[in-house]
Amino acid sequence: MNFNRYQRQTILKDFGPEAQQKLKDSSILVIGAGGLGIPALLYLNAMGVGTLGIVEQDIIEITNLQRQVLYTEKDLGRSKIEVVLERLNAQNSNTQFKTFDTFLTRHNALEVISQFDVIVDGSDNFPTRYLINDACVILKKPFVSGAIQGFEGQLSVFNYQGGPTYRCLFPNMPQQAEIPNCNENGVLGVIPGIVGNLQALEAVKIVTGIGEVLNGKLLLFNGLNQSYQAITFSLQPENLMLKKLHKSYGAELCGATAGISVEEIEEKLSEGKALQIIDVRTEVEFENFSLPQVKAVNIPLDELKGRTKELDFQSPIYLLCQSGKRSEMGVRMLEEINNKLELYNIIGGVDRFLAHHK
Amino acid sequence: MTILLFGVTKDIIGSSTLSMPSSSEFGVKKSKTVKELKEYLGKMYPELKKLSSLAVAVNNSYANDDTIIDNFDEIALIPPVSGG
């Protein structure tokens, strides 16, 4: 290792070459290369973490650029994992990268997480957050949780050395109706930058042993008045008893329902097959842009339950939205109404179609 | 007592803090525990009742439903947030 590269931190009395070596020997998994994951990845990579894992399956969209500062206008439509790997490789060629071009699901979570020492949760939905918690509890891995909304952030280290878990703070996953959906969830661009950097700092403290780890404390950050408030909480021992993942982590979890790729859809269409494709985006989104090659019927997600009479239950139903998240929820909704339907979520949605034709 | 509001509770109540009158003025029943405070707030702001996973802190410590609240305590309502 070229210690000169890290000289500005190895000259620190409380860090030194010893901590640098520990960083090099460590492996850290960052779940989600979005608003939180990007700053965390950039600093962990710059500082000399030996092995970095990245889980991500999204495509870069224009609405990402206000906070996901690694991506440029030229990257629109490309896969995040590909661009991240390219940039991080250029930033530090000594790092070993393990990329997972997938969403975290209950089928792959244990296998992926087991390969790393510390997990950084930069995901953007509750089902994934609860899945990460449960998988980390089962595998006894500490995880650094960051979450943001609006002008605020939350930060904590869970499951560290037998300490409290995410479920000790928020025992049950919020119901769908309580969660602001992807149309409504706003955030000021710089907020995830701050919280993601704090996550990187906690991950570094865990693997090097410097300082005090933020476990048993929830840090609440309010960007509007620059206040940081720490709430202490304790372990509920039953939350460590978990031996298996739950059977389901709810509607929002990508990859949990039957998915179909854009390529498969296009192949079917090119064979002249008439497909029942339901676009669950809002009317405005549908009018603004719909794919010429896909003859879709627009039924917005919030009207889907009331308009099932318009669907042909005898043939397969393919649900489409912008990124694949709302259509995933749509599949879940229809499943609840009738569990005999042949339902498919078009993975990656309109964005993936566009990327495919670039 | 002062109640600090975070996440969606701020949107529901419409401000970032809420000052509560002292317990003797709480109406018919005195609000003394976290559970009673939640019920009282739920009546005033029905949207709050929809939050199944709302953490309450009293003086910067996580509180259970039966934690006793004093007039001078600082309360925080903390819903989980999921954004990334």
Image: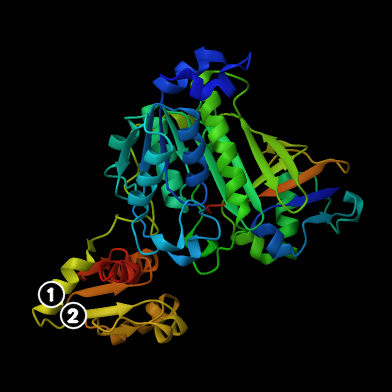
Residue A144 position in % (x across, y down): 51, 35
The residue at the point 39 percent across, 68 percent down is: A326
- Point out the frontmost of discs 1 and 2: 1
Q: Residue flagged by tag 2: what amino acid is it? A: Leu
Residues under numbered marks 1 and 2 in contact, where contact means CB atoms less than 8 Å apart? yes
Residue B21 position in % (x across, y down): 89, 54
Kindly identify which residue carries mark 1: A268
For disc 1, the neighbor class at 10 Å (few under 14, some 14 to 19, many from 20) is few
In front here: A235 or A219? A219
Rendered image: mark on residue A291? none
Q: Are marks 1 and 2 on the same chain?
A: yes
Please say whether residue A257 is visible from this viewpoint: yes
Q: Residue flagged by tag 1: what amino acid is it? A: Lys
In front here: A344 or A53? A53
Kindly identify which residue carries mark 2: A275
Please say whether residue A170 is visible from this viewpoint: no
Query: Residue A301 is drawn in which quadrant?
Result: bottom left
| N-terminal-most mark, 1 or 2 | 1
The residue at the point 57 percent across, 40 percent down is: A197
Determine the chain carrying the residue at label 2.
A
